[in-house]
Image (spheres, rainbow, N blue to C red):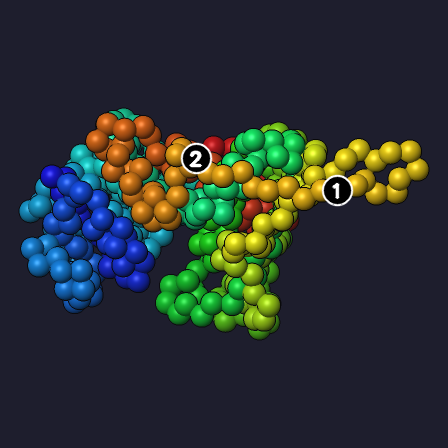
Amino acid sequence: MQRAVLVGCGAMSRAWLEAAQTIEGLEIVGLADIDTERASARAAEFGLTGARIADSLDALLTTEHPDIVFDVTVPGARHDIVATALAAGCDVLSEKPMAASLDEARDLVARAEAIGKLYVVVQNRRYLEGVRRIRRAVTEGVIGDITSLHCDFFLAPHFGGFREEMAHVLLLDMAIHTFDAARLMSGATPVSVYCHEWNPKSSWYAEGSSAAAIFELDSGAVFTYRGSWCADGLMTSWESQWRLIGTKGTLLWDGHDGVKIEIAKPAGPGQFFSEVAAAELPPLDASDRTGGHLGVLQDFIAATRGGPLPETVGTENIKSLAMVFGAIESAETGRRVDISI
């Protein structure tokens, strides 16, 4: 039986515990939060009558000696929590972003590698079926080689709490999901970015609720992002609206269940436009892990038991984080920024 503790009992912890309770051989032995009443309430909600309640990770490490730490704290606490858990010899699964800076992310990756422990990030949206099916289509060459990806993300959530006071809130807290999906769909790594960030006068966020970015990829393709967290009316899906253009045709995804693909025939003499024909998404196979939080958690637990490295392990997820901090640097300086890990 593996022993796990969870730190940070806010709203996101519910999805984590729902997923964790489906994993055989995994026991939640402790919950920590600076508000112990909140931790107690979460324990009661999930019937964790034997779990110890504490106000810090240190307290749980001392008494419960866990194998695994689930870090669901706010981004500013990430480095301390993960570093402490690794120092105690625990494998760690954390919320995104994996760190509050690229230097902190590099440090955590180095710490995990030095002691042979896992540091994995919950990049749950890459485990959604729609993202996986598009990745399958690209892998199988349905629309040929990808030449560009374009996405729109327009929502208007009133979170309250820390997000409405965060610097670079859209880029740092949400855009990483979209950037990570672009990496997965394209199979390419971004090498540079130009980004403009602003805060519309209608915004209820302190700053940075809207952004537009252009990424160059190592494949030669381009990825463009347009997003806002204060865009009332005609909102997109949380997964964005996507257009992928390839050498053979185009794929559209509405972020829900709507996918359209058109494959073009080479234009003949005198033709103004090429003829196009509809195509279908290929089916997923057993290697296409889905399931959101559960999919990530299953892969993480399998890795702690000797299975393959999860695809969101720190050494890989830092590439998505580098996109975020490259975009932030570009927004702050007004210059194109090279992305390096």
Q: Is residue 120 visible?
A: yes
Residue 141 to residue 84: above or below: above
Question: In the rendered view of the protein, which quadrant contains the N terminus?
Answer: top left
* Residue at the image point whose x is 47% and y is 41% from the top: 132
Query: Which residue bears the numbered disc 2?
Result: 285
| Camera sees residue 79 | no
Q: Quadrant of residue 217?
A: top right
Q: Secondary structure at mark 1?
A: strand
Left or right placement of residue 97 versus residue 41 in this view: right
The residue type indicated by label 2 comes to Asp
Horizontal placement of 81 versus 48: left or right?
Answer: right
The answer to whether residue 126 is above or below residue 188 is below
Task: Decide if residue 65 is on the left or right side of residue 123.
Answer: left
Front in this rendered view, residue 232 or 171: 232
Q: Nearer the viewer, residue 30 or 47?
A: 47
Q: Is residue 339 above or below residue 325?
A: above
Residue in the image at 35% along x and 34% along y: 310
**Dot label at residue 276:** 1
